[in-house]
Structures are given as structure tokens and as C-alpha cells.
Image: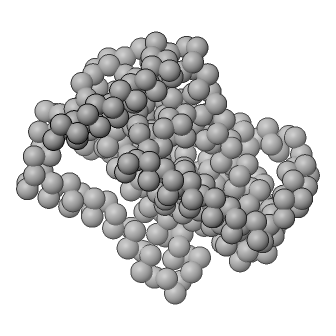
Amino acid sequence: MKKLLSNFLKIGITVFLFWWLSRSVEIGELLAYFKSIPRGLVLAIFSLGLLNVAGQALRFYTSVHFLMPAFTAKQLVVSHFSGFALRLILPASMGEVGKVFMLPGNNKTRIYTFLLDAFYCTATNLFFFGIACFLLYPQMWYMLGFCLVFIVFFWIYRLLVRTTNFKKHIPDTVPYFKFGLANISFSIFTMVVYVAQYWVLLKNFGMSLFDTAKASIFILGVGYIPLSFAGMGFRENGAQYVLANFGVSSHVAVGTAMLVFSANVLFPALIGVIMLTFVSDIKLRDIRAMVKKKEQESKDLKRES
């Protein structure tokens, strides 16, 4: 019931956000903007999207390489792209964390590796989000608090280790420094590519590279709000809000956010679905069946209790 309500809540919020967006953005203008983008420019955005995905793959590879058992190149590629697909297909069940279960290892190592990878990546993005917010809106100086996210997350981590049984979920040896250095480096690389995608589309509308960097990092951070499917709705409204400060029209702002999202998430998710259906040893139907089985076991357990 909780998962069902969570799904309906996310669907409701996503629909509401797009309805709110439709009040200021006409579909006709949005379609006209898409048609006006040169094919070469669209190709450049999707090429940069593949570079973004490659950067994320290298980050993911270093993460699992440090902590998990040996795996094949096929397993790594399938696992990486399945994360994009599962993020959209199973948002209330496995989500992106499901990708680590496509690799060999025990559940303890799988989950901890994913959490540590997500910690460094999320903290890096939120760190720069705080700076971008301050540069865009100096009166919101308190947003610089996001720059303390590494310290806050580390403090929470130490608190969990000392006061709970969380320690038993930690592998025996964890190369935190090497893990963090590699993860942060690749996270910054993918952020640079993300900024480049926006700049390629917005430079013809009078946006400088520096202004584009501030705005796009702000949009990236807003997309982290976990109240809709994959940040949809928040990202587009955030783009409309922040780019209006630079004279960019609503349909251009929203269209740009949608195109970049398609290149970075939807296209890789499509590849992930194809791999899970035809390439992976663990098929998409097997994952769905496993999720249904776990949900049924959970229901039976609650009834017995």
C-alpha cells in the first residue's frame, strides 16, 4: 500500500508540475522550437550525452572495481545501462540501485557500493549547486550551506557507525580516499559535459558560458528533488524560472531541458531496456517477476504477523 501510494503521489506531483508548466508554455511554441534546432546541433547534444554516459560509466566502474568481486565487461555495460532503465521502470521498487544486482557479489557489498557511489556523486553535485544558487541569487547566501554537504554526510555516516548496527553492512576494507577521488573527478567531468550541452543550445540566445554554467548546475540540482519520476517537472520548471533571468523565453528554456534530459537519461534508458531484453543474462521479465515475488512475500509476512 505504501509503494502504491508513493507511486500515485509521484504521478500526481509530476502531472501537476507539467500542468503548471503548460500555463506559461504553449505546446505549439515548444514544438516549433524543437523543429528550429538544426540537426547537427541535435546530434551534438546526443553525442555529448553519450560522453556524459561514458563519464558516469567510468565513475561506476571505479566504484564497483574497488569493492566488488571481478566482473566481465558485458556485465558492467549491461549493469550501467540497466540503471537508467530501472530508474524509470521501477521507481518505487528497485530503481537505479537495481543495477548493482546485475553484478556478482553479495547483497551487503552491492548495496554499500551503490550507497557510497551515490554519496560522493550526490554530494559533489549539491556542493556546486550551492555555489550556483549563491552566484545566481546572492540574497540566498544560506544556499552555500550545500557546500558543507560532504561534512554533513560524513558526520551522519560516523553517527550511524557508532550508534547503530550499520557497521555490519560495511565491507572489511574500503579505500575511501581512492574511491572518493575517482568518484568526484568523474562527477565533475560529467557536470562539465552537462554544462556544455546547455551552452551549445543557449549560446545563440545570448547566454555566456559562465551564465550557462550557473543556470545549468542550478537546473541539475533542482532535478534531484525526489518527489517526481526522475526529477521530471521540477527540472523543466526550474529551467523556465532560472533562464528567464537571462532573457530566455519559456518554450526555449523548457525545450532545452527536455532535449538534454532525453539525451542523458531517456536515450540511455532505451539502450538499457534493449540490453535487459536481448543481451543480459538476467532479463527484464525476470526482474519484474522477482519484484512481484518480493512484494507478495512481504504481504504474506505482514498477514502472518
The image quarter in which residue 295 lies: top left
Residue 185 sits above or below residue 226 on the image: above
Count of numbered circles in the view: 0
Q: Give residue 237's position: percent from left, percent from top.
A: 65, 66
The image quarter in which residue 109 lies: top left
Q: Give residue 42's position: percent from left, percent from top.
A: 80, 42
The image quarter in which residue 256 lies: bottom right
Quadrant in which the C terminus appears: top left
Residue drawn where x is 24% and y is 24% of the image? 106
Residue 168 sits above or below residue 162 on the image: above
Residue 183 sits above or below residue 195 on the image: above
Residue drawn where x is 32% and y is 43% of the image? 115
Query: Between 278 and 183, which is closer to the camera in this rendering?
Result: 278
Left or right: 132 as drawn, with respect to 27: left
Could you tell me if residue 249 is visible in this image? yes
Left or right: 41 as drawn, with respect to 106: right
Query: Between 171 and 212, which is closer to the camera in this rendering?
Result: 171
Q: Give residue 248's position: percent from left, percent from top.
A: 79, 70
Could you tell me if residue 66 is visible in this image? no
Q: Among all residues in the image, which is located at the extreme front?
A: 303
Query: Between 2 and 261, which is closer to the camera in this rendering?
Result: 2
Query: Between 271 and 217, which is closer to the camera in this rendering?
Result: 271
